[in-house]
Image (cartoon, rainbow, N blue to C red):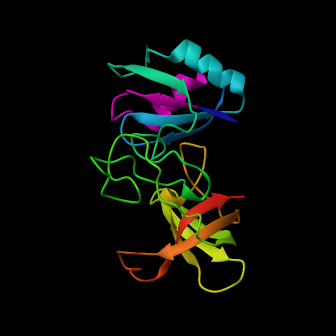
Amino acid sequence: MTAVFVSGFDFDTPESTVESHFSAIAPVKSVRFVGKGNAVVTYDKESDANRAVDELNNSTMEGNRRYVNVKIDQGGKGKGKDGKDGGKDRGYGGYGYGGGYSNGGGYGKGGYGKSKGKGRDYSDGEMEDGVVATFNDDRGYGFITPSHGGDDVYVHFSAIQSDDSYRTLHQGQNVRFVMGEDPKGKGKGKGKAVCVVPS
């Protein structure tokens, strides 16, 4: 399956309009909204996605006034993937908030910023095996059952290391994760997964 990243359509555009517009190329496997005015549209074939880019880039959807930009989704859009929202480093240290202002005094080794930062370094953390117990796409969090037993571990979508722009997990999926401490919220002081690598 190959996806295209669509941006620039009116905020109140329904999913059915996006699906209808892109179904003109080939049957659409799924449509996922990413923020307002953006979506990831998935096709079964890469050739269909490439055709959508060629034929639908700078087109206008029904009921819209604006042109849409259509690009192959290479993992750089969506929630926290490239320099606009997240770190670029992979492996254990794949999650960060960017390069930061001046010397970078924020999260990890970067800080809030728009440049590509190193992100948090989890290379000292011990990777554990587990299975996804639940994951709520709408809320962006779920729980992992560690293979060694014990209580389920909280995981936020931002901890997921993936080349896809839409980071999610599926019930029953095998994962490897690094444990950390939850610094805030109801789970303050309890463990949570700070780096999750789908198997």
Can residue 31 be found in the magenta stretch? no
Residue at 55% x, 57% y is 93
Residue at 71% x, 82% y is 148
Where residue 178 appears, x then y in whole percent?
Answer: 59, 69
Where residue 63 appears, x then y in whole percent?
Answer: 36, 22
Residue at 59% x, 79% y is 152
Residue at 59% x, 50% y is 90
Where residue 2 appears, x then y in whole percent?
Answer: 66, 33
Instruction: Examine the rendering and report whether any part of residue 152 can be seen.
Output: yes
Can residue 20 be found in the magenta stretch? yes
Q: Is residue 116 left or right of residue 199?
A: left
Q: Is residue 175 left or right of residue 124?
A: right
Instruction: Give the quarter of the image for residue 153.
Output: bottom right
Q: How many marks?
A: 0
Where residue 89 appears, x then y in whole percent?
Answer: 54, 48
Instruction: Give the quarter of the image for residue 12.
Output: top left
Read off the magenta span: 4-23
Residue furthest to the left in view is 102
Residue furthest to the bottom in view is 150
Q: Nearer the viewer, residue 7 or 18?
A: 7
The vertical placement of 152 against 62, above or below, is below
Q: Nearer the viewer, residue 10 or 81?
A: 81
Instruction: Give the quarter of the image for residue 133.
Output: bottom right
Location of the N terminus by quadrant is top right
The vertical placement of 137 against 151, above or below, is above
Instruction: Examine the rendering and report whether any part of residue 25 can be seen.
Output: no
Residue furthest to the front in view is 103
Location of the C terminus by quadrant is bottom right
